[in-house]
Image (cartoon, grey):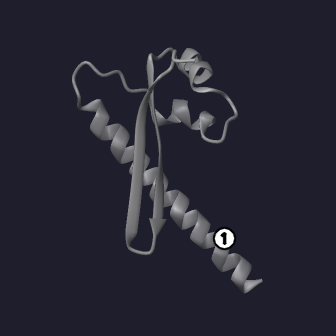
Amino acid sequence: MINKTISHYKILDKEYFCDGMTDQIITNLTKLKNLKVTARTSVNKFRNTDKTIPEIGRELGVKSILEGSVFKSGNRVRITAQLMSSSRI
């Protein structure tokens, strides 16, 4: 039971870290002129979706979507990001 609880807290810690990184990236992107950035609260519903990029783009009313991931292991962090056209398929 204790190991299961510790594992649960490690998962929550990584999710919290990733959410913080997402917030920071969104905050930095909002500082760019001529770039419309959708709020995190609007895009969170697509976190684990099976919807395609074009479907998400239509629902959000955007031309491009920045998708990526954050991996944290110990003191190491890897962030990947890819700007994709939401009308490419």
Helix or strand or loop: what does disc 1 sit on?
helix
Q: Residue at x 28, y 39 (%)?
A: 28
Percent position of residue 10, x then y: 58, 71
Which quarter of the rendering shows the N terminus? bottom right
Q: Residue at x 62, y 35 (%)?
A: 45
Is 46 situated left or right of 22 in this image?
right
Percent position of residue 79, x then y: 40, 53
Image quarter of residue 63: top left
Percent position of residue 59, x then y: 59, 18
When the figure is inspected, residue 3 is found, relative to residue 7, above or below; the finding is below
Which quarter of the rendering shows the C terminus? top right
- What is the residue that sits farthest to the right in this orientation? 1
When the figure is inspected, residue 52 is found, relative to residue 14, above or below; the finding is above
- What is the residue that sits farthest to the front in this orientation? 89
Image quarter of residue 34: top left
Image quarter of residue 52: top right
Is 12 situated left or right of 26 in this image?
right
For badge 1, the amino acid type reads His
The crowding category of the residue bearing disc 1, from other C-alpha atoms within 10 Å (few below 14, some 14 to 19, many at least 20), is: few
Depth check, front residue: 41 or 3: 3
Is 14 situated left or right of 64 in this image?
right
Q: Residue at x 54, y 20 (%)?
A: 57
Percent position of residue 78, x then y: 40, 58
Q: Residue at x 51, y 18 (%)?
A: 88
Q: Which residue is mark 1?
A: 8
When the figure is inspected, residue 39 is found, relative to residue 7, above or below; the finding is above
